Amino acid sequence: MSISTKYNPQETEEKWYSYWLDKRFFHSEPDEREPYTIVIPPPNVTGVLHMGHMLNNTIQDVLIRKARMQGKNACWVPGTDHASIATEAKVVAMLKEKGISKKDITREEFLKYAWEWKEKYGGIILEQLKKLGASCDWDRTRFTMEEDLSDAVINSFIHLYKKGNIYRGIRMVNWDPAGKTAVSDEEVIRKEVNQKLYYIRYTVAGSELPVTGNTPLTTDNSLTIATTRPETIMADSAICINPNDERYKHLHGKKVFVPLINREIPIILDDYVEMDFGTGCLKVTPAHDLNDYELGLKHHLPVIDILNDDGSLNDKAEILIGEDRFIARKKIAKMLEEAGHLEKVEDYKSQVGFSERTDAVIEPKLSLQWFSKMEELAKPALEEVLNGEVKLIPEKFINTYRHWMENVKDWCISRQLWWGQRIPAWYFQHEEPVVAKTKAEAIEELINRVPERREWSEESKAGFRKQAEEFITQDEDVMDTWFSSWLWPISVFDGFKNPDNKDFNYYYPTNDLVTAPEILFFWVARMIMAGKEFTGKKPFTNVYLTGIVRDKLGRKMSKSLGNSPDPIGLIEQYGADGVRVGMLMSSPAGNDLMFDEAYCEQGRNFANKIWNAFRLVKGWEVETSLPNPNEQAIAWFESRFSEALTEIEHNFKQYRLSEALVATYKLVWDDFCAWYLEMVKPAYQQPVDAATRAASVKFFEQILRLLHPFMPFITEELYHDELFGERSEMECCIVADYPTVGEANEALLKEAELVKGLVSEIRNVRNTRQISPKEALELNIKVNSEVSYDQWLNIVCKLANISKAEVVSDKVAGAAGFMVGKDEFFIPLSQNIDVEAEKERLTKELEYLLGFLKSVDAKLSNERFVQNAKPEIIQNERNKKADAESKIATIQESLAAL
RNA sequence: GGAGGAUUAGCUCAGCUGGUUCAGAGCACCUGCCUUACAAGCAGGGGGUCACUGGUUCGAACCCAGUAUCCUCCA
């Protein structure tokens, strides 16, 4: 082992990760132990690790490692998601660079490129997770588009279709013009955007006055609407006004002309229109706005769709054909202005939907899509959370969850993409589509679903099959990625292919799921639905929702802001253990975390602290003839360890990982290093007795085990040092027994706190008087309490550099004095004490105590308090009173003696 | 517009059943130390009207109501 004063993580991390892999410690097979299972939220196959993953996976690894050490059969299933839109967008971009356009190649050719891309870049993120120390069972790595998982997707589609839960229909969907596909409501991100509100004049039909810039305008010859989307006026089907709006009563039943194209449209009445918004006149564009679409249905208006799939204008627009919607917006504003139809333009802030995957502005668009009915699926999934079968942590998410589940809308599951599971629907001539797994099955279904075809002779059937074979076509669309992710906990254990298999029976339902609250509905809710629907069981018991990682200014980390540190860079700089500690240190469950590299630095420093504590213990020479002078210190630390472990376990139970870590950190740094080791360490170059060494080594090993889930690498490294004796090849920290809570001697712990206070006071005496720590002092103790200082004197002498400590019965004059608890301490000094300063200090303390006593007295003399408060509270107040009174007396004596 | 959450030290946050000398931790800051495990360290210290206003209670950072500010989700 190196004796460097600095811990060097790089070599250690590489070495132990391969060792763990080599010895297959991460691998799990069903056995008689209790399983503990986590399925990873599968990251995008082409993605790279970001800070959110770091947090997420650190938490999962801590949980899985702890469970493993606690004797459970821990299984963490990793994998990746095919992420249709994101991946397809990347492949399209890659092809574009090669000069290939998606529309020039076939579906098969495209998929070939996509798979190549996936093979090349897929799984980078999993390699990165290894650097973090993630102890996933890599043998179980799954991918949502591998054959079995795709099969599960297709089969569950067919299952739901047969139940009548899947239907095809024309609906207004969120159209992503960059991805050229529909996306679900959940994939639309609303952002506030600075826009322009254009006020546009429409000429009233039949009015004689031509509308120009110079002509006086009245509401008889024109009306003005306000819109943020002037490029859609060509798609207008009507103008709508509120029937109660006095300003426009004379226009009821009239018509207006759409500017520039002069198409005549009616003025309709509906109290949907808010009179005080804009001008009180609303242009109705059913093809390009959800609300307008509903309004159009109600008033039987035609739907005029002027946009191509890529967001450019089509020939129905009549003008600006082929222009992109945003360019068209600018151009049309100019054209309207030139034609005298643009009254004014105002700045306006509004919410605009963006595609989660491509960041393009979402276009509401009517299209023919496949939908899954959600109402029936949602009910049991809501119930499961409300009755506590599935726990959301923190609980505050239950409300949000309920709100969403009670207002759930049907799920648009088709996507106009090629990368993904193709919808198993088949079209033959003008018949209703058939849903079937294969072409052959589809053809059989075509025959079987029509009674008269069923009656056909075998010969006729054969002829039909031949014809159908040639003309039947499969739906071009693929399914929403979430339609495969929602099956993840089931399909990774082959629960669809073989529902009674050993793995599935053993690992499912899984235990904990760790994920971001952003995908509570996208994914978590739907997994619960799928679990209940397809297996009748919940997919997991606990859902730990992490916060969002933000930068220290509170901004979300994003590529465009460039405020996200490179996780691998952080690991290189601070070590994986350091980064893990840094991430957890500041991340209470469910609260966002303001990430600051300083936390990683703190983590690295902690690793270094452990390293150096180790160097100390390792350096001790043992002299077996020596007696053990440290029984008290050893007994104390044993109790303290148990006390801390109780607290740590309590925090773990409540998924307060951050607090569990802080408690561990303090136990190691403060109690073990700063107190225990200082108490027991022999003087420079002196040997240590065997008992002290044995106890210290044992403590150290317990500490390594306790730390392992948080800091796997450094603990494994130290665990194998010869200090702990021989280890066989499978004897590793990763599978060592996690410490269990032992006895804690309360009285001992209490006394130790007093002793720590005493040592601090002595150090303070030095500090305020600038006495070097090297200069030994004498200590006189006047004991007024029950504390048996004899047991502690050795420790006090050592820690505070006291040459002689004595119990005295009287105050010592001319010495620096202070109190700890009820007891008085005196340190004779060579220099004269500053009587005035001493007086001031004592007076101040006296005043505080008198005030305190007064408030306690007030309570105790309050009859209602004595009547209502719990007896133990009252007793407590009496104790406080007695304590304060005795201290006051002591201080008064001291003052008198000065 | 609807729902949920937050507001405690300069920063990030604990404070769990209202009651201990309860106002805490880490970081940052100040002072002094390169004291033979560790300067990535050690010792000591300063720093708070618990957002505001009321209420409930013997007792409120904690419960209730209102106000302000901020965040998130949904429309």
Image: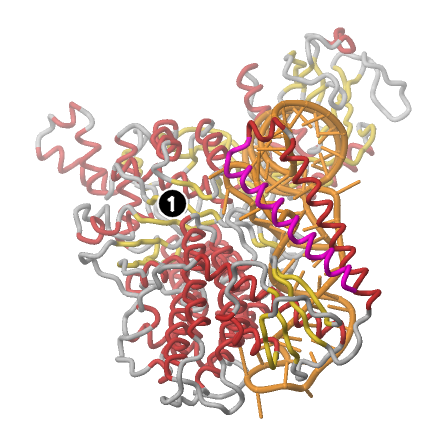
The answer to which of A353 and A814 lies nearer the viewer is A814
Is-magenta flag for residue A878? Answer: yes
Task: Count the labels in the image.
Answer: 1
Q: Is residue A30 above or below residue A262?
A: below
State whether the magenta stretch is mostly helix, strand or loop: helix
Is-magenta flag for residue A551? Answer: no
**Residue sitting at x 52%, y 73%:** A673
Q: Is residue A259 visible?
A: no
Q: Amino acid at mark 1?
A: Asn
Q: Which residue is mark 1?
A: A542
**Residue sitting at x 61%, y 46%:** A882
| Element class at badge 1 | strand
The answer to which of A744 and A310 lies nearer the viewer is A744
Q: Quadrant of residue A23?
A: bottom left
Region rendered in magenta: A869-898
Whole-percent x and y of residue A513?
A: 39, 49
